[in-house]
Amino acid sequence: MTFIKRMTAANKFTTADVLQHLSTDTDWQVRCVVAYNLNTPVDVLVKLSTDRKTVVRCNVASNSNTPVDVLVKLSTDKHWSVRLSVANNIRTPMDILENLSTDENTGVRETAKYKMK
């Protein structure tokens, strides 16, 4: 059943209502795929941005529909992989990239510097 939920969450034709429902699944892998889907409603992305699983937050930070204010919050996440995803997001504002360019993690720092070019 989990496989079917993940495949449904990944489908670009899955409706917002179904994605909303899947975003509350107990399986973190389902929530992870929902966070990556470009059809996921903004309010669901906002909710998933506080998920306890790092990989879910990474996918929210990677999603080009994630609101800038959520990217700002995720740019200070305790896990470097979330900050790296923020640095790679095309919607991340320049001032956040500037902050990330001094990150303690080399990968985050270098990615932010590259994206500022």
Image (cartoon, grey):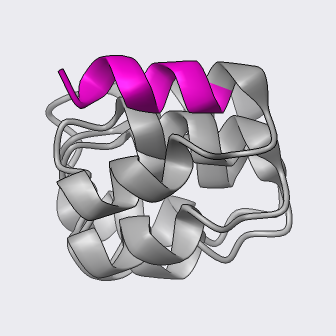
* Quadrant housing residue 10: top left
**Residue 26 x, y percent position in the rendering:** 83, 63
Q: Is residue 50 magenta?
A: no
- What secondary structure prevails in the magenta region? helix
Q: Is residue 55 shown to the viewer in this render? A: yes
Which residue shows up at 23% across the image and 31% down it? Answer: 116
Side of 46 relative to 90 (left or right): right
Please tell me how many numbered marks the rendered image carries: 0
Which residue shows up at 77% across the image and 41% down it? Answer: 80
**Residue 4 x, y percent position in the rendering:** 59, 27
Quadrant including the N terminus:
top right
As displayed, is residue 78 above or below residue 87?
below
**Residue 24 x, y percent position in the rendering:** 64, 72
Instruction: Return the residue nearer the eye: 69 or 48.
Output: 69
**Residue 43 x, y percent position in the rendering:** 31, 82
Q: Which residues are magenta?
A: 108-117
* Quadrant housing residue 12: top left
As displayed, is residue 62 above or below residue 31?
above
As displayed, is residue 113 above or below residue 30?
above
Q: Is residue 29 shown to the viewer in this render? A: no
Quadrant including the C terminus:
top left
Which residue shows up at 62% across the image and 31% down it? Answer: 108
* Quadrant housing residue 113: top left
Q: Is residue 110 magenta?
A: yes
Side of 27 relative to 101 (left or right): right
